[in-house]
Image (tube, rainbow, N blue to C red):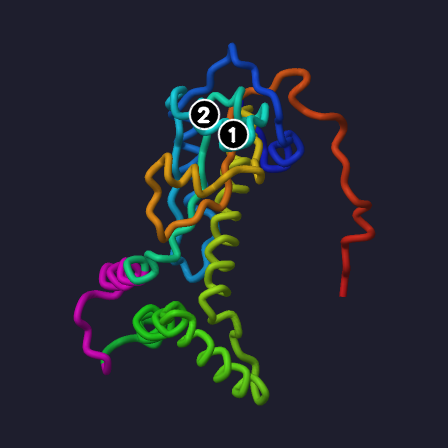
Amino acid sequence: MSKTVSEAINYRRSVRIYDTERTIDTNIVKKCIKQASLAPTSSNMQLWEFYHITSKETIVKIAPLCFNQSAAKTAQQLVIFVTRKDLWRKRAKANLAFMDTTFGKNNLEAKQSSREKVARNYYGKIIPFVYSDLFGILGYLKYLMVLIVGLFKPMYREIRNSDMRIVSHKTAGLAAQTFMLSMAAEGYDTCPMEGSDTWRVKRLLNIPRGAEINMIVSCGIRTEKGVYGERFRIPFEEVYKEI
């Protein structure tokens, strides 16, 4: 029986050892990945891809690249969250195509609603301005422009290539967390593994050069030894700031 959101949050732990005798349903994992694709995403650009590893042979090859962590060696399946900042043009065009289905195609600008004008301007002009770069030179010039204009009014300041890389990783991280909570709701366990040789994993899976691995998440069902002790968190009062 599926858990509530609160139950899933409390159930989720980073599981280090999975029961190798108990399999998990590939279709359920795929459903959780699909739910992850509904996570919030900056400007709805969806600069992500999800690699669902179900092949035992491939998992065996990936485990050493995760430094033979038990969470990798005993995993039933793996899900690799990949950022695709390099696809920003394609994703912007997809959003513009969605505008055609929402507002109609080839509407004269004079007849467009204010909402349509804003949306088309955003994906047709603002997104290209923010994401475009040329060996870091254009990003630096944009940064200087924003620095000057920002002296006089609030400005969006994350416009360099390195900034947009961070944005795409934040978005992928939201998807990964949504996936892990969805898995917890199904009674399945996960472990986000920070320790890995992402370059070698990319090469093994033939992931495009312009892509980056955000997170490798192992999946399975926990054993009694799979959770390393009680959950520890810094006292809430130390991290909570009400203003």
Residue that mark 2 sits on? 77
- Residue 131 vs residue 11: left or right? left
**Residue sitting nearer the eye, 135 or 31:** 135
Q: Does 103 appear in magenta? A: yes
**Residue sitting nearer the eye, 68 or 163:** 68
- What residue is drawn where x is 56% and y is 85%? 153
Residue 122 percent coordinates (x, y)? 36, 71
Q: Which stretch did the figure color magenta? A: 92-110
Q: Which mark is residue 68?
A: none
Q: How many marks?
A: 2
Q: Amino acid at mark 2?
A: Gln
Residue 50 percent coordinates (x, y)? 39, 40
Residue that mark 1 sits on? 218
**Residue at mark 2 to residue at mark 1: CA–CA distance:** 6 Å
Secondary structure predominantly adopted by residues drawn in magenta: helix
Residue 200 percent coordinates (x, y)? 43, 38
Question: Which quadrant of the view contains residue 191?
Answer: top right
- Residue 115 vs residue 188: left or right? left
Labels 2 and 1 touching (C-beta < 8 A): yes
| The residue positioned farthest toward the left in the image shown | 106
Residue 113 percent coordinates (x, y)? 30, 75
Question: Which quadrant of the view contains residue 130?
Answer: bottom left
Q: Amino acid at mark 1?
A: Ser
Circle nearer the N terminus (2, 1): 2
